[in-house]
Image (tube, rainbow, N blue to C red):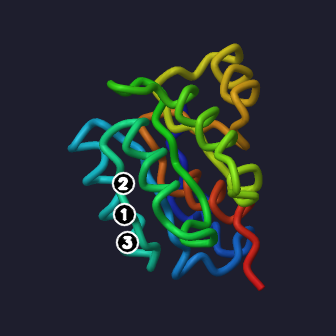
């Protein structure tokens, strides 16, 4: 193998493919404390506001108890106690008197990364699927694609 000259390496710049996501409000359902802490730190550094739910049941409660428009997007782990991400998504999507429940983008964040896992997320009513361990650039792109700012 040939060693590449460092000057020939293209630096990745995601700024041209995303719009401003500062002040985006995210409901993050993640039962693993370390995963939640790492994601929160990385996203808050970008100006994103994070509200954490420790499981799917809590995510549904937090979403239901807050007024419409409180959250711009939901990042949903799949494998959680009490209520998994698929069940929580279905519960949020079926909330009565909450038209935003059908519209809010919900993105799966899971270690399950096979094509059938992606399809299961979409079938459950999610808008996208991110594999763990999370890559912050991919999370930012997913938020940018799904949250439309005026």
Q: Quadrant of the C terminus?
A: bottom right
For image coordinates 37% across by 44% down, the residue present is 58
The crowding category of the residue bearing disc 1, from other C-alpha atoms within 10 Å (few below 14, some 14 to 19, many at least 20), is few
Query: Which residue occupies the foreground of this view, 124 or 5?
Result: 124
**Residue 103 image point, x, y percent:** 76, 55
- Give the CA separation, mark 1 to mark 3: 6 Å
Q: Secondary structure at mark 3?
A: helix
Q: Would you name the residue on which mark 3 appears?
A: 44
What is the number of the mark on residue 131? none
What is the number of the mark on residue 42? 1
For image coordinates 68% across by 52% down, the residue present is 101
| Callouts 1 and 3 close, C-beta under 8 Å | yes
**Residue 68 image point, x, y percent:** 62, 69
Relative side of 92 to 19, left or right? left
Q: Secondary structure at mark 2?
A: helix
Query: Which residue occupies the foreground of this view, 75 or 11?
Result: 75
Decide: is 68 above or below 92. Answer: below
Q: Which one is earlier in the sequence, the residue at label 3 or at label 2?
A: 2
| Callouts 2 and 1 close, C-beta under 8 Å | yes
The crowding category of the residue bearing disc 2, from other C-alpha atoms within 10 Å (few below 14, some 14 to 19, many at least 20), is many
Decide: is 1 above or below 150. Answer: above
Residue at the left extreme, as displayed:
33
Q: Would you name the residue on which mark 2 appears?
A: 39
């Amino acid at each position: 193998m040939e060693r590449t000259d460092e000057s020939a390496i293209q630096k990745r710049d995601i700024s041209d493919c995303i719009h401003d996501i500062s002040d985006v409000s995210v409901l993050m359902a993640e039962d693993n404390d370390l995963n939640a802490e790492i994601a929160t730190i990385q996203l808050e550094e970008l100006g994103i506001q994070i509200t954490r739910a420790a499981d799917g049941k809590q995510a549904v409660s937090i979403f239901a108890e807050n007024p419409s428009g409180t959250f711009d997007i939901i990042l949903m782990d799949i494998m959680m106690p009490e209520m998994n991400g698929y069940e929580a998504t279905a519960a949020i999507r079926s909330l009565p008197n909450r038209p935003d429940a059908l519209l809010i983008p919900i993105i799966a964040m899971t270690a399950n990364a096979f094509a059938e896992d992606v399809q299961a997320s979409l079938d459950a009513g999610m808008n996208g699927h991110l594999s763990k361990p999370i890559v912050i650039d991919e999370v930012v792109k997913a938020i940018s694609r799904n949250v439309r700012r005026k």
